[in-house]
Image: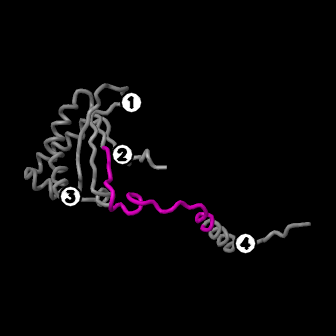
Amino acid sequence: MQIPIFKAKGPAIAALGLAALLWSSTIGAAPPQRGLAADGKDQPYVIEYYYKAKWGHAEEFLALFKKNHYPVLAKEMELGRMLRVSMTVPRYHTTEDGRWDYRVTIAFKNATIANDNFDSSVLTKQLYPDQDSFKKEEQRRFEILEAHWDLPIKEVDLEAR
């Protein structure tokens, strides 16, 4: 017995392929996730910012960060955009390729606020009327960095099944 083969061409094949893709994507699809992934409105959104200063410049970086950047972050906390800002340093040293000097952790109110392209220039102009000095110091803060990376994180519920 021979099985009949459907022979379709051009748009018919494309339509069948699209229908099969849509149908297969609904089979076994996970239910929508709650919280952060679903709407971003209810859960804090945490990002870790890592800074690796050039050798001998970590203290200078910290001084410039505390002088020019932390006050802006504090203002954003006052506005309710951020829930907390903290900084940590490693207790011991690591290999050079894995080294970082400072990790700043910011808990935003939610994912929407964390990704809303907030323009902090209004705050910096209020806090630092001498914009030329502010810009030079911020440029210096980044000149002395060897590396910088941002890492959005989420907690894993170890009790969940």
- Specify the label residue 80 is tagged with: 3
Q: Please state which of residues 38 and 131 is positioned toward the viewer in this rendering.
A: 38
Element type where label 4 sits in the image: loop
Magenta stretch secondary structure, dominant: loop
* Residue at the image position 16 percent from the left and 39 percent from the top: 64
> How far, Cα to Cα, is label 4 from label 1?
55 Å
Place of residue 52 in the rendered image (x, y in percent of width and height, measured from the top left): 29, 35
Instruction: Name above or below for residue 50 compared with residue 34.
Output: above
> How far, Cα to Cα, is label 2 from label 4?
47 Å
* Residue at the image position 47 percent from the left and 62 percent from the top: 32
**Which circle's residue, 2 or 4, is located before the other in the chain?**
4
Name the outermost residue toward the left.
129
* Residue at the image position 11 percent from the left and 45 percent from the top: 133
- Name the residue tied to disc 1: 97
Place of residue 156 in the rendered image (x, y in percent of width and height, measured from the top left): 41, 46
Which quadrant of the structure image shows residue 102?
A: top left
Residues drawn in magenta? 22-48
